[in-house]
Image: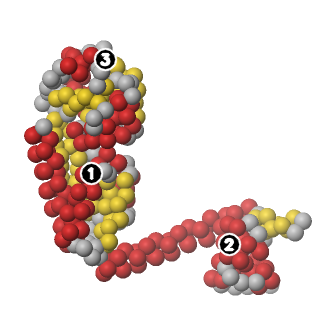
Amino acid sequence: MTRKFRQPTLRQIEVFKAVIETGTVSRAAETLHMSQPAASKLLSNLEADSGLDLFERRRGLLVPTVRGHRFYEEVDRIFSGLDQIGQAIDILRDEERGRLTIGVLPALSGRFISTTIRSFSDEQPDVFISLHARSSQFLIDWMRTGKVDVCIVTGRVDDPHIQAESILKMPIVCLMPQDHPLAHREQLTVADLEGIPLVAFMDSSYARHQMERIFEAANFRPRIVTEATTSQNVCELVAAGMGVALVHPAYAETVEGRVAVRPFVLDSFLDFQLCRLRQGRNRRLVTAFVDKVRATAQTFARDHDAT
């Protein structure tokens, strides 16, 4: 006669998951605010009801079997889905309260974004703002999953669901140590940098591709001696005397007064992309914030031209 198994209860699953994650029944019981005998009984009932041997008993310890590990993977996947539902609920509640989640590159996480947020908050004082500084790819992935409302990244954004506009499109500048032999020049060309040690971004970055295109167009090969992932690292390496870097003017802010900044004579520009979902949430707040980003970018560009 075929044995009939019963569907496990949610409480049984919770105990099972807690035992796997904490290592013992006693710690699992403590986590779930229940007694150890009650947790042990629920675990035994789960194995009986499911017909699966989920644990081996070794000297008083519970060791997950192969089936136990596989069952946990399925349980964890399902619970992760429940967590996403909880996140969706939080998002809807945040919209009602007025919340804006902003993503920005570390390079713009200083004065630029702070000025923008201050201006926005002056007009929207009841809006809670959450600011995250991450890489471009990280922020775009977050935007696709709805974790950020608006973000500022580098490079081209190829996604039909994301609306992107160029901001801070400005001529590249040459950053160098203050005592560098080229620091006496008022402006520099590609030819001036032939054979000069360069500090560059990693070869997968937008800024690196732009720099390599500049040298290739002039039939020169850049002499890259150091590379880094972030603008702050690139600029600090320049300040430490490692070489010269071609960067966006905004990057020089963190090393102001410690490096020499010179115009780079070439019709080449770097910019950032201001992104938002075409059918995203918080449209009123996002639109208001985007307007403030544009205004701050215009002021930054105007101030830079004045210098």
Seen in the picture, residue 146 relative to 199 is either above or below; the reply is: below
Q: Quadrant of residue 258?
A: top left
Q: What residue lies at 37% left-to-right and 53% top-to-bottom?
A: 133
Q: Earlier in the sequence, mark 1 or mark 2?
A: 2
Label 1 Cα crowd, 10 Å radius (few <14 / some 14-19 / many 20+): few
Give the percent coordinates (x, y) of residue 139. Answer: 35, 54
Residue under circle 3? 196
Q: Which of the 4 image quarters holds residue 116? A: bottom left
N-terminal of the two: label 2 or label 3? 2
Residue type at numbered disc 3: Ile
Residue type at mark 2 is Ala
In the rendered image, residue 105, in percent from the top left (x then y), is placed at: 33, 49
Disc 1 is placed on an element classified as helix
Residue drawn at (77%, 74%), measured in percent from left and top? 26
Residue at image coords 70%, 67%? 22
Q: Which residue is mark 1?
A: 111
